Amino acid sequence: MPFENANCYGYAWNVNYNFAPGSLSQAHESVDLEGITDVNEAARIVMEACQADGLLSQQNATAYQIAVFINTYEGERLDYHFYRHGPSKWSHKMSNTGAVEDGIDDPVAHNLGLINTKDTNDDLIIGQHSCGTLYRPETPTPDKIIEILED
């Protein structure tokens, strides 16, 4: 299976690695949403961590799109989820145990379709919030990202 070690964030970065937003930042502090129940606060924290990792708020010539979501799970637990845009369609991967799903026309509509379904960890998704789109620059390369994460 391609990207067998990647979670949704690793997959969005095109890296076969399981890591969280903030892990590539100067501080190497990955996002932890435990105890946060406000979706807007969670969205702000995740978007800031993604930008600290190097994702861009505006597209440049060598960037591709990454759609960012906050999903609400049964028990009011919040977690992030990511989609990446390929040559013509979107794709995503549910956690580091799921298969890549591609051929998605609209990540917002697709993510809405996950409500009232269980993820690969058997957790029920009860809501979703679209945070917007960020852009993945050409650098760092997947090999460089793994080097940063393993330091």
Image (cartoon, rainbow, N blue to C red):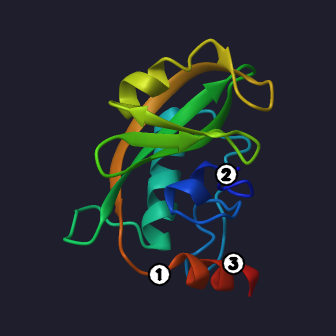
Task: For label 2, count other residues whose C-alpha is less than 10 Å away and answer few (under 14), some (14-19) or many (20+).
Answer: many
Residue flagged by tag 1: what amino acid is it? Pro
Farthest top residue in view: 116
Task: Tell me residue 73's x, y (percent).
Answer: 68, 25
Secondary element at image label 2: loop
Calculate the distance from the C-alpha at mark 1 to the C-alpha at mark 3: 12 Å
The residue where tag 3 is placed is 149
Say whether residue 10 is left or right of residue 124.
left
Task: Tell me residue 117's x, y (percent).
Answer: 65, 15
Q: Is residue 137 above or below residue 72?
A: below
**Mark sitting earlier along the chain (3/2):** 2
The residue where tag 1 is placed is 140
The residue where tag 2 is placed is 7
**Mark sitting earlier along the chain (2/1):** 2
Front position in the image: 114 or 28: 114
For residue 29, which quarter of the picture? bottom right
Farthest right residue in view: 122
Residue flagged by tag 2: what amino acid is it? Asn
